[in-house]
Image (spheres, rainbow, N blue to C red):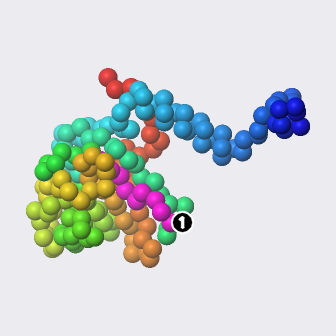
Amino acid sequence: MTRNGRQDVTSHRGSPRQGLALAPWQRAWRTTALVVLVGGLASPALATAAPSSDPARASTGYALPLSGRVTVLRGFEPPPQPWAAGHRGVDLAAVPNGDVLAPGDGTVSFAGRVAGRPLVTITHADGRRSTLEPVAPDVVRGDHVSLGEVVGTVSPHGGHCPQTCIHWGVRVGSSDPPAYVDPLALVGMAGPIVLLPMP
C-alpha cells in the first residue's frame, strides 16, 4: 500500500504503477462510453440510411418500413438469454401520421392493439414475422401486402421513444421464448454502428 491508501499494481508489462486495476470488461466499457460520448457530440444520430428509390428491387426481399432518409434511434440489442431484457428490434425516427410501409411481401397476421399500442404484424413467406409499432393500421388480418406497400400510419401516441419513432421487430421460428433477429441485417445495414459527424 502507498501513503495515499492506493494499492500498487503491476501492469501487464511488469512496471509498477499506482491506481486500481480495471478488469477487461471495465476497460471495454470505458472505451465504448468514451466513443459514444465523443461521437454523440459530433452527431445527434446513431446512423442514417437512404433506402433504395425502388424498395421492390431490394436484393434481400426486405426494405426499411419508412420512406426517405431514415435515422436509427436505437439499434438491436439482443438479450444475453432469450427470456432476459433486451431491445428486440430497432427504433426508427418517424413523422407523426407518416406512412408506414411493408418491409417485405407477406400476409397481415395481426392489426390492432396490444398493451394499448397500435401495431401491425406481417408474416413473410420465409416464416419471419415483422411487427411495426405504434402504427394505426390501414390493413386487416388476412390482407396480402407487397414490399413497400402502405400498411398504416405512424401513431403519434403509444410509442416508447422520447421522440416519434417506429419500432420494427423481426421474430423467427416459433420457439418459446421467441427468437428475434436484427431487422437491419435484412436490409444490409447490420454491423457495428460507427459514429461519424453529419455533413
From this view, report whether residue 17 is shown above or below residue 105: above
- How many marks on residues? 1
Boundaries of the magenta span: 84-92
Left or right for 187, reference 194: left
The residue located at (30%, 66%) in the rendering is: 129
Q: Residue at x 82, y 36 (%)?
A: 6
Kind of residue at disc 1: Gln
Badge 1 is on which residue?
A: 81
> Which of 88/97 is in front?
97
Residue in the image at 35% along x and 52% along y: 90
Q: Position of residue 104 (x, y in %)?
A: 24, 57
Residue 146 is covered by the magenta coloring: no
Residue 34 at what x, y percent from top left?
Answer: 54, 33
Residue 2 vertical placement versus 131 (above, below): above
In this view, the residue in front, 13 or 188, is 13
- Going 33% across and 59% down the picture, which residue do you hit? 169
Question: Can I make out residue 139 in this image?
Answer: yes
